[in-house]
Image: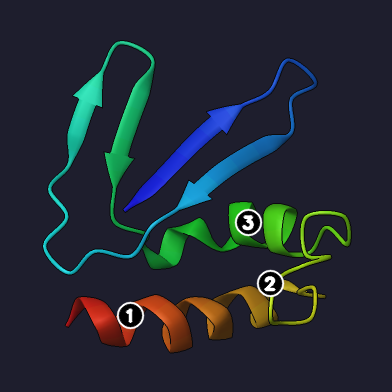
Amino acid sequence: MMIVLLRPSGKWCTLCIIMLNTPTLTADRLIIRKFTEDDREPFLDIFGDRDVNTHLPWFPLQSLEDAATFYQNRYERVYQ
């Protein structure tokens, strides 16, 4: 499941929860859905931010390739 919010500053803000059977839920201002490979840029924006990653068990992502690998290792296998 991925909850993506757009802050007034224009930066992405997410709450990530992995669920194996995540349905897509849609409201007027919110979409809750599984991550997809197309989420590389938001992954890089969020998980590449040193402040966001201060207390997380991985190093900040450095590139879109890192973001693709992060998705494949953490989400793609879980969703299959």
Drawn side of residue 73 relative to residue 12, left or right? left
Q: Secondary structure at mark 3?
A: helix
The relative height of residue 9 versus residue 47 in the rendered view (above or below) is above
- The residue pinned by badge 2 equals 64
Which of label 3 and label 1 is nearer to you? 1
Q: CA distance from mark 2 to mark 1?
A: 16 Å
- Quarter holding residue 38: bottom left
Q: CA distance from mark 3 to mark 1?
A: 16 Å
Decide: marks 3, 2 in contact (CB < 8 A)? yes
Residue lying farthest to the top in this orientation: 28
Drawn side of residue 42 relative to residue 59, left or right? left
Determine the residue positioned at 17% across, 42% down.
Answer: 24
- Quarter holding residue 6: top right
- The residue pinned by badge 1 equals 76
The relative height of residue 9 versus residue 20 in the rendered view (above or below) is above
Q: Which circle's residue, 3 or 1, is located before the other in the chain?
A: 3
What label does residue 41 carry, if any?
Answer: 3
